[in-house]
Amino acid sequence: KQEVTQIPAALSVPEGENLVLNCSFTDSAIYNLQWFRQDPGKGLTSLLLIQSSQREQTSGRLNASLDKSSGRSTLYIAASQPGDSATYLCAVSGGSYIPTFGRGTSLIVHP
Amino acid sequence: DVKVTQSSRYLVKRTGEKVFLECVQDMDHENMFWYRQDPGLGLRLIYFSYDVKMKEKGDIPEGYSVSREKKERFSLILESASTNQTSMYLCASSPRGRETQYFGPGTRLLVL
């Protein structure tokens, strides 16, 4: 059964820092990997989707990479801002169309 | 833009009541999902549906049922609400295949 782990569970950084969030998964036979953002008390918003054949995806200050063979993905956030404060979740889809979610990294960017 | 809406943002119910949570999506997606999210436990799948009138149990279906009579609407039913069903409930939809999931805003349910 696929297991997804996100480290660290929580992170607090000063504004302007570049930071990396980590996601690891146990079964490398994946179809895609997705990063989501969740604001407190809200639903999830998709940030980036990486297909298994891709190595990375970029959107603005966000860059997600995928190393399928080692079972790892990273989400890089450049020049962090207080508005980036949220929980970030990764989800991996494999043989079924039901993704497996990690428990998330709670990020606080303080001014 | 894909839109997934949920009938209520906040709901307070009494133990033993029958509770209906409604989810509607406007993008003709085949797949729809119901999750609950609790601190420390993450997202857990309750039920999903890959077509009208089709449903499959997720990881924690006990105490819940679902209904999908129309493609755009997926309902979660708590037959007899209990306090341990106090949670955040999230609905999601996706097109056929393993593509992006789109989430609704969530319903925070409190069972007293």
Image (tube, coloured by chain):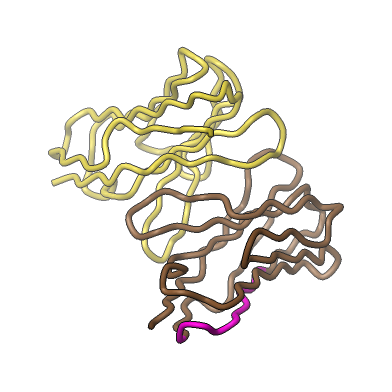
Residue B20 in percent (x, y) is at 28, 27
Q: Is residue B105 magenta?
A: no
Question: Which quadrant of the rendered structure holds the C terminus of chain A?
Answer: bottom left
Q: Nearer the viewer, residue B101 or A15?
A: A15
Q: Nearer the viewer, residue B16 or A102?
A: A102
Q: Is residue A46 left or right of residue B107?
A: right
Q: Is residue A31 left or right of residue A79?
A: right
- Image hue for chain A: brown
In this picture, which residue range is highlighted in magenta?
A: A14-23
> Looking at the image, which residue is at 54% across and 79% down?
A8
> Looking at the image, which residue is at 35% across and 33% down?
B6
Q: Is residue A15 magenta?
A: yes
Residue B53 in percent (x, y) is at 52, 15
Prevailing SS of the magenta stretch: strand
Q: Is residue B93 above or below residue A100?
A: above
> Looking at the image, which residue is at 46% across and 78% down?
A10
Residue A29 in percent (x, y) is at 82, 53
Q: Is residue B91 left or right of residue A22?
A: left
Q: Kindly indicate which chain is depicted in yellow in the rendered structure.
A: B
Q: Is residue B66 left or right of residue A103?
A: left
Residue A67 in percent (x, y) is at 81, 67
